Image (cartoon, rainbow, N blue to C red):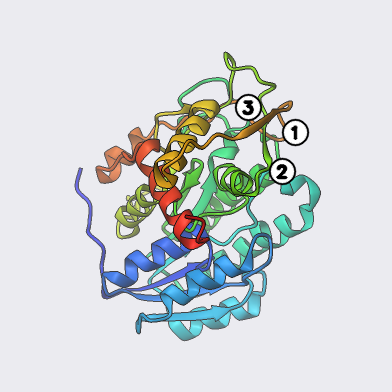
Amino acid sequence: MTYNPLDVKKTYFITGAAGFIGYHLAKNLLEQGCQVIGIDNVNDYYDVNLKVERLQRLEPYENFTFIKGDISDKELILNLFEEHKPNIVMNLAAQAGVRYSIENPDVYIQSNITGFYNILEACRFHPVDHLVYASSSSVYGANKKVPFEESDSVDHPVSLYASTKKSNELMAHTYSHLYQIPATGLRFFTVYGPMGRPDMAYYGFTDKFFAGEEIKIFNNGDFENDLYRDFTYIDDIVEGIERLLSNPQIEEGEVPHRIFNIGNSNPEKLMVFIETLEKCLSKTLGRTAEFKKKFEPIKLGDVPATYASTKLLEEAVGFKPKTSIEEGLQKFVDWYCDYYKVV
């Protein structure tokens, strides 16, 4: 296994730069001296103030350029590629959320399908060294075989969000085949950490704790057959992406497209995750913290388990996520309490 280190002389284009993963990746690249162009429509799917805060933390870097815009605007995207001539593109902009895709499907088609198509078109007309794009563990649907491997069938998604991510993988493969665009899709597994997404369960649970409200746990109170999730800390996600950026797969006679899981490959029961979050809150607050719990049936579109095999990622770039939920959740809680001034 050999891989090329990050090339700081290249220009990196990040869509969704005000988002959770986009922000952390941009910050990491900027700290190493890379030229970063970021775009985001700063929508109100969750608290805009958090997105603004992320962008404000990136503004001091002289090598950062931010454009407020939507990737579904094809003319804008083509013009930006013409002007900035990015070498490496990371498409992290997407309408996220499984349950929200049931309530508001239109925005998923606009951002995840049309938006990604525009990025592919831009890479077609303005060739790049590598296109890295966000897929999702949700493409595995309700697969029973674990751990999930990249070669598993992903033909039975259980949410529109998952369908759009599966579509992205197919679209990228086609463009790689037709136009020799080196592309890599990343199936993320439940990413969490400081400056995270408020629509994620761990963040929402913490909000409700400080509001004195009960949390809803969608497992019917069945602790024996609890939901399992492969929780992956944000720093591990960023390191995995960074290691891949300068390492597209280009082999004679092969379509230059591949897919990797990025997950902790150590799934935890949801109740264990919640108990760990309680312990972290207790430690930060210096008092016993316990959630008020209400158990409900599993939600439409949810899957019983996510569990990543990361063997391919390890073989390609020698990396395997390693942050424990104890360490990762403690960092989140410490950030949360400081950010919202609740200590």
On screen, 50 above or below 97? below
Please tell me which residue is depicted at 47% across the width and 47% down the height of the picture. Answer: 192
For the residue marked with disc 2, what is the amino acid?
Arg
Residue at the disc numbered 1 = 300
Residue at the disc numbered 3 = 142
Please tell me which residue is depicted at 57% across the width and 20% down the height of the picture. Answer: 144
Do tag 2 and tag 1 residues touch (Cβ < 8 Å)? yes
Looking at this view, is 268 or 300 the one in front? 268
Dot 2 or dot 1, earlier in sequence: 2
Secondary structure under tag 2 reads loop
Mark 3, Cα crowd under 10 Å, few <14 / some 14-19 / many 20+, is: some
Question: For residue 259, what is the image quadrant?
Answer: top left
Secondary structure under tag 3 reads loop
Residue at the disc numbered 2 = 99
On screen, 70 above or below 226? below
Please tell me which residue is depicted at 45% across the width and 28% down the height of the picture. Answer: 267
Dot 3 or dot 1, earlier in sequence: 3
- In this image, 173 relative to 60: left or right? right
- Can residue 155 be seen here? The reply is no
* Residue found at the very far top of the displayed protein: 224
For marks 3 and 1, give the CA distance: 12 Å
* Residue found at the very far front of the displayed protein: 287
